[in-house]
Image (spheres, rainbow, N blue to C red):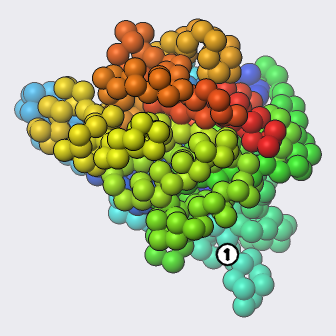
């Protein structure tokens, strides 16, 4: 089922192989028909992660980057929409030389060729491929077929791991293996035999059940891997190592692994466990609800970046998810809620819903010197709040919300204006990595300790340069600018403990062993409080 931990399993296997000195890359396959997830609603899809070269992808690419500590690119991600787009364009250009284009083998062949491109680009010894969705569903059949064809071509080079959930129904109190047996059967029906079964469950699978799965699924007992819930996803590589996953993969693929060094992962876990003194961070967002459940999936990288920064200073991150619409309904709760926190973050977002609540939170943070970190929309709204409350331009806004405002402090650049008029929405934002020059003497420059940094973007609107002078007069420092000085990339406030916001998304480059400097600075300011 979805959300069972395939991404973290893939990422953790990659981490184990990398720790053995092997070159590793990873590919994520999303079977849906959207060309990329960029146009999907965040509550529906969760976070959109952006690669350095500007592809909008699934959050699993973020997991791979964090666990592998490698930058991935557009070759590491595909959807069925992108596959069919390529095939149909190729057919239109006579690329199939007058032959009939068939579901099989033409679609699997395109899938395989993309996997090989990713492998070659990274010069990888091992390429991990995650097939999204659930075995037995219609959507991913052609990917299973691709897997079968790759295995047929080179049986010793392809391994298949089934990640399955083993429920422990409350009324029984016993772990059940039958759904996993059926999942393995479904794979068999697709002509595939799993080499590993990763047993996701609340508890570790015991020996009798390992044997049961081994016999019924035709998998060696030592390849039935316990994968119980753990407190931190970063414990998974360590757990997998204990289960022998790394050694088993290396031996099955007949690889020579030069070393084995998992100490940094064990140290990270020790560090997490010994970081007991909390910092309380509020994240003021709006993409939380699906029915009766509250999900913070839309802010996954933000959550991870907070953790990385907090652990680096030996603090336990306590994250409070705050729905900005609740502030709008009960303005009295802004102060009572925020005064209990050590810092707040306003992450990325789109559209008008919930922004007044975010502006209330920001005003509180600015006036009460509560550490503040704004991410993308969080920077744009920061400028709007200052324009309204400090500069007195009551109707200041972004043209995304109010195209007729008399103070468009955030606006569209001409090329984006044209795209909007043409309804050209997919993959057309300012996407991916751009350079940013940091101003001498600024907090941002001190935090990065660099003159030029490269961070990743995903937005259409920009700070309007016409108002820059006015903002500077009231203590706003434009501490990060595009090299041509046209675009504001970071703002900070003088006379504030920590008020920093970026037009880019610093959360996307944060790694467990290398927190992003803006998050680290924010965590330190929060800890001081
Ligand atoms: N909605 C804003 C824009 O398009 C901000 C986007 C974001 O926060 N990622 O510019």
In this view, the residue in front, 225 or 484, is 484
Which residue lies most toward the bottom here?
171
Inspect this view and state whether residue 9 appears. Answer: no
In this view, the residue in front, 166 or 458, is 458
In this view, the residue in front, 524 or 119, is 524
Q: Position of residue 115 (x, y in %)?
A: 44, 33
Q: Position of residue 61 (x, y in %)?
A: 52, 39
Q: Is residue 77 above or below residue 41?
A: above
Which residue lies most toward the front here?
392
Q: Is residue 326 above or below residue 439?
A: below
Q: Is residue 134 above or below residue 403?
A: below
- Figure label count: 1
> In screen coordinates, is 41 left or right of 348?
left
Structural crowding at the residue carrying mark 1, measured as other residues with C-alpha within 10 Å and reported as few (<14), some (14–19) or many (≥20) = some
Q: Position of residue 399 (x, y in %)?
A: 26, 41
Quadrant for residue 495, please give it: top right
Inspect this view and state whether residue 479 appears. Answer: yes
Residue at horizontal 40 percent and vertical 65 percent from the top: 137
Q: Position of residue 130 (x, y in %)?
A: 52, 45
> In screen coordinates, is 182 left or right of 144?
right
Residue at horizontal 76 percent and vertical 61 percent from the top: 228
> In screen coordinates, is 372 left or right of 233?
left
In this view, the residue in front, 276 or 3, is 276
Quadrant for residue 267, please give it: top right
Quadrant for residue 3, please give it: bottom right
Identify the element where label 1 is drawn. loop
Query: Which part of the image, by quadrant, shows the C terminus?
Result: top right
Per the image, the residue denoted by label 1 is 167
Residue at horizontal 78 percent and vertical 84 percent from the top: 173
Whether label 1 lies within 8 Å of ligand 1 gets the answer no
Residue at horizontal 58 percent and vertical 29 percent from the top: 493
């Amino acid at each position: 089922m979805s959300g069972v931990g395939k991404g973290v399993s893939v990422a953790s296997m990659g981490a184990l192989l990398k720790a053995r000195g092997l070159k590793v890359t990873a590919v994520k396959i999303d079977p849906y028909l959207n060309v990329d997830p960029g146009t999907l609603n965040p509550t529906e899809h969760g976070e959109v992660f952006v690669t350095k070269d500007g592809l909008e992808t699934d959050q699993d690419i973020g997991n791979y980057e964090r666990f592998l500590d490698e930058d991935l690119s557009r070759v590491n991600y595909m959807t069925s929409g992108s596959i069919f787009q390529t095939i149909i364009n190729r057919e239109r250009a006579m690329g199939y030389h007058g032959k009939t284009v068939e579901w099989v083998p033409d679609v699997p062949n395109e899938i395989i060729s993309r996997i090989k491109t990713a492998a070659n680009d990274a010069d990888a010894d091992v390429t991990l491929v995650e097939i999204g969705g659930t075995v037995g569903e219609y959507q991913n059949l052609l990917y299973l077929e691709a897997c079968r064809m790759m295995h047929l071509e080179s049986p010793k080079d392809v391994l298949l791991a089934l990640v399955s959930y083993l429920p422990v129904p409350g009324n029984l109190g016993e772990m059940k293996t039958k759904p996993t047996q059926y999942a393995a059967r479904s794979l068999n029906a697709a002509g595939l035999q799993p080499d590993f079964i990763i047993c996701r469950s609340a508890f570790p699978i015991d020996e009798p059940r390992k044997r049961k799965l081994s016999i019924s699924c035709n998998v060696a007992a030592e390849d039935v891997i316990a994968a119980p819930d753990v407190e931190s996803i970063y414990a998974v590589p360590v757990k997998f190592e204990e289960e022998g996953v790394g050694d088993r993969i290396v031996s099955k693929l007949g690889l020579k692994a030069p070393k084995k060094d998992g100490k940094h992962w064990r140290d990270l876990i020790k560090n997490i466990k010994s970081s007991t003194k909390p910092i309380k961070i509020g994240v003021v967002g709006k993409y939380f609800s699906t029915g009766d459940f509250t999900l913070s999936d839309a802010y996954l990288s933000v959550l991870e970046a907070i953790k990385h920064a907090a652990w680096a200073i030996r603090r336990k991150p306590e994250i409070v998810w705050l729905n900005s619409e609740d502030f709008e309904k009960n303005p009295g709760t802004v102060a009572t809620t925020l005064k209990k926190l050590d810092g707040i973050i306003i992450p990325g977002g789109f559209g008008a819903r919930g922004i007044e609540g975010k502006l209330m939170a920001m005003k509180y943070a600015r006036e009460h010197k509560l550490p503040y970190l704004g991410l993308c929309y969080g920077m744009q709204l920061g400028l709007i709040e200052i324009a309204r409350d400090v500069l007195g331009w009551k109707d200041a806004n972004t043209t995304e919300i109010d195209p007729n405002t008399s103070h468009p402090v955030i606006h569209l650049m001409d090329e984006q204006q044209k795209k909007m008029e043409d309804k050209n929405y997919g993959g057309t934002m300012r996407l991916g990595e751009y350079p940013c020059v940091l101003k001498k003497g600024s907090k941002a420059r001190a935090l990065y300790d660099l003159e030029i940094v490269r961070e990743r973007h995903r937005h259409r609107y920009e700070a309007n340069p016409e108002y820059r002078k006015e903002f500077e007069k009231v203590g706003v420092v434009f501490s990060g600018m595009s090299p041509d000085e046209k675009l504001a990339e970071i703002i900070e406030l003088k006379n504030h403990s920590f008020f920093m916001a970026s037009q880019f998304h610093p959360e996307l480059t944060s790694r467990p062993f290398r927190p992003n400097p803006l998050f680290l600075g924010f965590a330190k300011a929060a800890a001081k409080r």
